[in-house]
Amino acid sequence: MNETHTNIDGAIMRESPYGMLREPTFSGVLSFMRRNYSKNLTGADLVISGIPLDLAVSYRSGARLGPQAIRLASAEIASLKPYPWGFDPFEKLAVIDFGDCYLDVHNPTTIHQAIVDHASGILKSRAGMLTFGGDHYITYPLLQAHVEKYGKPLSLIHFDAHSDTWIDDKPDSLNHGTMFYKAIKDGLIDPKRSVQIGIRTWNDDFMGVHILDATWVHRHGSDAVIAEIERIVGPHPAYFTFDIDCLDPAFAPGTGTPVCGGLSTAQALAIIQGLTKPNIIGMDIVEVAPAYDQSQITALAAAHIACDLICLYATRKMEEKV
């Protein structure tokens, strides 16, 4: 292949899913961190995909454009070894960008199963998943697909301003504030082994999930949060979900239901970078709504979080090979 052509559009021109490729951050085919854009799951260790849904929001819509915004922001961090990790995670992992889940938004009753089928098809391979929302409802069908593969119940590591455990006994409802109520009722997650970080909206029933609210995080610091997550979750298989509104609106204005008093981007990254012990088997980042963003700071935060999650996943895989 002509070298001139391999220096740009790595998402479609790179012959191998491994390694980084230096190319202009302001141009080229859009994929997350310039990973190969592919529907071929053969040999993939980790699959990135988007679920562009925002029909379940309770306030501002626009998160359907979140996956696109995160991919665009990721170009800025795609050519250097991530800090503070100091290694290229793509030398350790074969990571592809699978594109987005197809949703028939004009037929909402099909959406839940479409997400389950999308995730199940990927998880039938040996690959793990890192998923971009979309609103937070998507985590419910994603949990169903992961439980189908890994067994239930899973632990939940959940960063958010909201607990999302409000009562909802309507089986077909699309609601981004009730899916963990349903997931606990369905036995998908074990509340005793689950933790929610950054909460700052009241709920009369947190359903037994451990809460490290935003005030607790601010008072005790990142190291204490890491220690508590490790204590609560232990070695149990855990699903990781990050609602970008866990961050204070000063750091993430581009979201549907912003709540003041949240974590800084620096706090969130420090906590995530320290989570090297939990057995994280699936991950998502949700609720980025670029129409309300300023200078891409919300999408950039999501892209950096995603990069750290990939590095965590690579670290775990390296330890398993030792």
Image: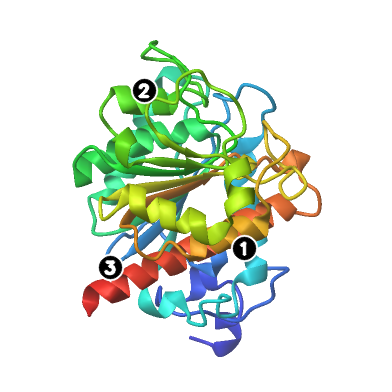
* Residue 19 at x, y percent in the picture: 45, 80
Q: Which mark is residue 224?
A: none
Could you give the CA–CA distance between mark 2 and mark 3, rounded to whole angstroms? 34 Å
Which element is circle 2 on?
Answer: helix
Query: Which is more N-terminal, label 3 or label 2?
Result: 3
Nearest to the eye among marks 2 and 3: give it: 2
> Mark 3, residues whose alpha carbon is within 10 Å: few (<14), some, or many (≥20)?
some
Could you give the CA–CA distance between mark 2 and mark 1, rounded to whole angstroms? 33 Å
Q: Label 2, on which residue?
A: 182
* Residue 72 shows in this picture: no
Query: Which is more N-terminal, label 1 or label 2?
Result: 1
Query: Which is more N-terminal, label 3 or label 1?
Result: 3
Viewer-side residue, 238 vs 314? 238
Nearest to the eye among marks 1 and 3: give it: 1
> Mark 2, residues whose alpha carbon is within 10 Å: few (<14), some, or many (≥20)?
many
Q: Label 1, on which residue?
A: 74
Q: Is residue 23 above or below residue 234?
A: below
* Residue 10 at x, y percent in the picture: 54, 73
* Residue 145 shows in this picture: yes
**Which residue is painted at 64% across and 67% down in the image?**
75
Q: What count of labels does the image hold? A: 3
**Which residue is painted at 42% across and 63% down in the image?**
96
Q: Which quarter of the picture shows residue 192?
A: top left
Q: Label 3, on which residue?
A: 43
> Mark 1, residues whose alpha carbon is within 10 Å: few (<14), some, or many (≥20)?
many
Could you give the CA–CA distance between mark 1 and mark 3, rounded to whole angstroms? 23 Å
